[in-house]
Image (cartoon, grey):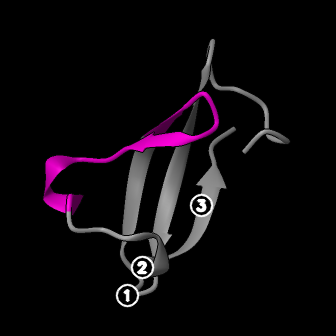
Amino acid sequence: MLKFPETGMGYQTVDVVLKSGEIIKDAVVLNAEDIKLPDEYSWLKLENISDVRVKK
């Protein structure tokens, strides 16, 4: 995440693509290391993610 531009001061907005094909839109990554997802995705683990797309 460090190589991508910030959306705002200290954060990036991303779309998270799951291996199931589902896309979580407009998730926020804080300080290029901590992603904030809606509560319904509290079960999500790193191995369930196939891609993270930084929004421009």
**Residue 30, numbered circle:** none
Q: Is residue 1 above or below residue 50?
A: above
Percent from the top left, x then y, of residue 30? 52, 30
Percent from the top left, x then y, of residue 25? 40, 52
Taking the magenta stretch, the answer to whether it contains residue 14 is: no
Q: Is residue 31 left or right of residue 30?
A: right
Q: Which amino acid does label 2 sit on?
A: Asn
Q: Identify the residue position indicated by label 3 in the image.
A: 52
Q: In this view, does 3 lie above or below 18?
A: above
Nearest to N terminus: mark 3 or mark 1: 1
Q: Label 3, label 1: how many angstroms apart (C-alpha)?
A: 14 Å
Residue plotted at (42% across, 83% down)? 21
Q: In which quarter of the image is residue 20?
A: bottom left
Q: Residue furthest right?
A: 3
Q: Label 2, label 3: how many angstroms apart (C-alpha)?
A: 11 Å
Question: Which quadrant does the C terminus fall into?
Answer: top right
Task: Check whether the beta carbons of the residues at disc 2 and disc 1 lie within 8 A of each other.
Answer: yes
Taking the magenta stretch, the answer to whether it contains residue 29 is: yes
Q: Nearer the viewer, mark 2 or mark 3?
A: 2
Residue plotted at (78% across, 31% down)? 5
For the record, the magenta segment spans: 28-42
Q: Which amino acid does label 3 sit on?
A: Val
Count residues near mark 3 (Cα–Cα under 10 Å), then give few for <14, some for 14-19, many for 20+. some
Q: Residue furthest bottom?
A: 20
Q: Identify the residue position indicated by label 2 in the image.
A: 48
